[in-house]
Amino acid sequence: MSVSRYWREAKSRYMLQGSKCGRCNRLFFPKRSVCPSCKSLSINNIDNFNLSGNGVIDAFTYVHEGLTGFEMQIPYVIAMIKLEEGISITAQVVDIDDNTKVYIGMPVRMVFRKIGEDGKSGMIYYGYKFSPDMANFG
Amino acid sequence: MVGIVSYGAYIPKYRIRPAEIGRVWGINGEAYGKSLNINSKSVPAPDEDTATISTEAAKAAMNRVNIKSSEIGAVYVGSESHPYAVKPTATIVAEALDITPYMTAADLEFACKAGTAAIQISMGLVKSKMYNYCMAIGSDTSQGSPGDPLEYSASAGGAAFIIGDEHVIADINYTCSYTTDTPDFWRREGQKYPRHGGRFTGEPAYFKHIIACSNMVFKHQNTKPEDYNYVVLHQPNGKFPYRAAKMLGFRDEQITVGLLTPYIGNTYSGAVMLGTSAVLDIAKPGDRIFVIGFGSGAGCDGFDITVTEEINSFHKEKAPSVKWLVERSVYIDYSIYAKFRNKIILGDG
């Protein structure tokens, strides 16, 4: 990933910042600058919107052949997560061990983790993952 | 009065026991752990570092209060394991909490006491009315060379304090420092692991500075050990704080709540702030806390703290307690530990 792209998308990656159509209140993640429903009427009427980070697992899979940079985490869980605002996003689920039973409907909360790095001397990329532990700390 | 407005903690969930470390290096790790009073230490996951631990602790602190992120004027992160040699951890934390851009930020380093140094700097900025609130963080994923005695204690964790002078849950009545040039522990530029002076880290370093700084607090505040409900001393292992507390005249029950090293090891810059967070989790109005942070090199920061009535309406329940974070644990063996701590050399293919 280029440094400029990472920097441009930092707010979205760090704190789940999406956008909201000021005309129909529809939420978007990733951000959109034009609402597909309101089209030209939404231009200059879209604001940033910070998502709560609370959601439930809608679908999941265990990854056994990890992507480059994820070798140390195999097997890991990738899930589609339905946020309480109604938006679905795909993300890694962490804090999973042999005793954790992952299930559809499992509450999760966004956590801030390392996503990857550009070699030993390059940028470190941070962003959102989700944890069942942090949704149930009560 | 300037004091703690909110606090938050974070401890990674993985643990390794001294017996398991000793098994690999051919020594009786269980006995070694007992001699240090360390039953287990926390281990960061492969995707956790000082920036992620700091951010989670800071988020916990923000979740407990109704303060807008734009009201935080400064973020300071004290650590000796910043992910970058050049590029601040503090800007990453501030960006992740939406505190940027109208604020100041910096990374601090003073071995294990960079977090308490961040508290003192924050107190000065609030007291001088430069900012209403400042965030002081102490956090580490500390390094111990494989097979070195440090490997049995060096762990990971952190805590974040919001310092301000409104809605203060704990007044900081007084702070002071005692500092000398004492080479008890160091890590040279570019080196992966620190070195230390073995037994030299005890008497001329830890004990001399802790005792001197404690006496400064007692003298200035005209207090005695029995005036405090809790004492939190820096905790490189589970043995030194008990000995220092006894030398100062504290009773064992005053130190137990804030002593986490037996369960999670030495979290370095996070240690004394996590211990103070554990005390704040159960403290009542009027409770008085005696806190001394120690950093090799060497120096101590002392604090005399009194819990206020505001703690009764403080939303502790909106973030994990230290007890919950300590008890959330998954034990791993040395091979998984080596993988998580990047001690295994992978090929290029």
Image (spheres, coloured by chain):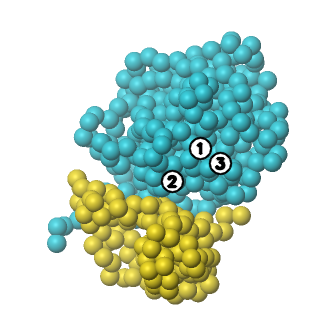
Q: Does residue B307 appear in this view?
A: yes
Please give the letter of the chain rendered in cyan. B
The residue pinned by badge 2 equals: B98
Q: Are marks 1 and 3 on the same chain?
A: yes
Please tell me which residue lies in front, B206 or B53. B53
Identify the chain of the residue marked 3, using the numbered disc in the image: B
The residue pinned by badge 1 equals: B71
Q: Does residue B258 appear in this view?
A: no
Please tell me which residue lies in front, B55 or B188. B55
Against B332, residue B30 (above or below) is above
The residue pinned by badge 3 equals: B67
Secondary element type, mark 1: helix
Against A118, residue B5 (above or below) is above
Query: Tag 1: residue type?
Result: Glu
Taking B188 as reference, is A85 left or right? right
Picture colour for chain A? yellow
Query: Tag 3: residue type?
Result: Ile
> Where is residue B59 shown, x and y percent of the image?
57, 54
Q: Residues at badges 1 and 3 in contact (C-beta under 8 Å)? A: yes
Against B150, residue B117 (above or below) is above
| Quadrant containing the N terminus of chain B in the rendered view | top right
Query: First in sequence: mark 2 or mark 3?
Result: 3
Q: Residues at badges 2 and 3 in contact (C-beta under 8 Å)? A: no
